[in-house]
Each structure stands twice: as C-alpha cells, then as structure tokens.
Image (cartoon, rainbow, N blue to C red):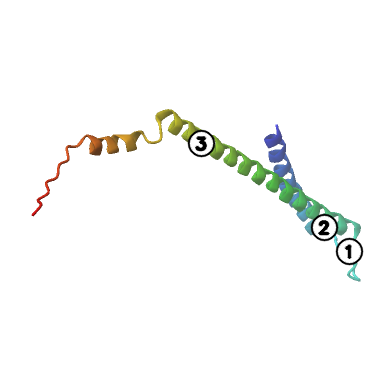
C-alpha cells in the first residue's frame, strides 16, 4: 500500500510541476515594474512544493529499497550460516586431514 502511495505521489508531483510550469508560461507572471503577479507566485510556489514532495517521495522509496536489500542480505547470511552449521564447517577439512593421518609413514635412521 505504501509503495502505491509513493508511486501516486511521484506521478502527481511530476504532473503538477508540469502544470505549474505551463501556468507560469501562459499567464502574465510579472507586472511591468517587475513585481511578480498572483499567478506567477502561484506557479513558483506550486513548482517548489511539487519538487519538495518529489524529493521526499524519492527518499522514502530509496530507504524502502535499501531496507529490503538489507533484509535480503541478512536472510542470505542466515541461510549460509545454518547451511555451514548443518553440514559441518570442517567436513572438508576432516576429509583432507584424514588422508594424511591414514597415510603410511615411515622413517629410517642410521646411527654411526
């Protein structure tokens, strides 16, 4: 549900930023003396608000993805640990060492 709300917020803010940009272009946004008109102020404030909402929704989405990735990594680490414990970490080590233990070994010494 949260993902849907973030997606809707992203879509709406992009749409609104475009609409406010068009509003600023199509209406008289400055008076002759350089003062911003009501419509100009509306367009600027609308664009700023839509940009802020977009940044916030992108940050929330980024944090959600980072959390999911962290949880997936933790799950994989836990699976690997349980697999190692089930199988026995030194299973392969014991195989290798047992070859050397079972190998015949002899030595001759000459004393003069």
**Whole-Å distance between the Cαs marked 3 and 2?**
48 Å
Name the element at disc 2: helix
Say which residue label 1 marks.
Answer: 36
Quadrant housing residue 27: bottom right
Residue depicted at x 17% and y 37% = 104
**Whole-Å distance between the Cαs marked 3 and 1?**
57 Å
Quadrant housing residue 25: bottom right
Q: Are marks 2 and 1 in contact (CB under 8 Å)?
A: yes
As drawn, is 31 to the left or to the right of 17?
A: right
Lower position in the chain sequence, tag 3 or tag 1: 1
For the residue pair 104 and 49, the one nearer the viewer reads as: 104
**Whole-Å distance between the Cαs marked 2 and 1?**
10 Å
Say which residue label 2 marks.
Answer: 44
Say which residue label 3 marks.
Answer: 76
Q: Are marks 3 and 1 in contact (CB under 8 Å)?
A: no
Eyeballing the image, is 7 above or below 22?
A: above
As drawn, is 36 to the left or to the right of 110?
A: right
Lower position in the chain sequence, tag 3 or tag 2: 2
Name the element at disc 1: loop
Residue depicted at x 85% and y 61% = 29
Q: Are marks 3 and 2 in contact (CB under 8 Å)?
A: no
Q: Name the outermost residue toward the bottom.
A: 33
Q: Nearer the viewer, mark 3 or mark 1?
A: 3
For the residue pair 33 and 44, the one nearer the viewer reads as: 44
Name the element at disc 3: helix
Residue depicted at x 72% and y 49% = 54
Q: Quadrant of the C terminus?
A: bottom left
- Crowdedness near tag 1: few (<14), some (14–19) or many (≥20) residues, C-alpha within 10 Å: some
Residue 14 got which mark? none
Lower position in the chain sequence, tag 2 or tag 1: 1
């Amino acid at each position: 549900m949260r993902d849907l709300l973030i997606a809707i917020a992203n879509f709406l803010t992009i749409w609104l930023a475009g609409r406010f940009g068009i509003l600023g272009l199509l209406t008289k946004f400055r008076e002759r003396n350089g003062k911003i008109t009501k419509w100009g102020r509306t367009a600027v404030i609308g664009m700023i608000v839509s940009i802020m909402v977009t940044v916030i929704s992108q940050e929330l989405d980024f944090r959600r993805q980072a959390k999911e990735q962290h949880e997936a990594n933790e799950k994989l680490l836990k699976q690997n640990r349980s697999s190692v414990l089930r199988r026995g970490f030194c299973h392969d080590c014991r195989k290798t060492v047992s070859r050397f233990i079972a190998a015949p070994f002899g030595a001759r010494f000459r004393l003069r």
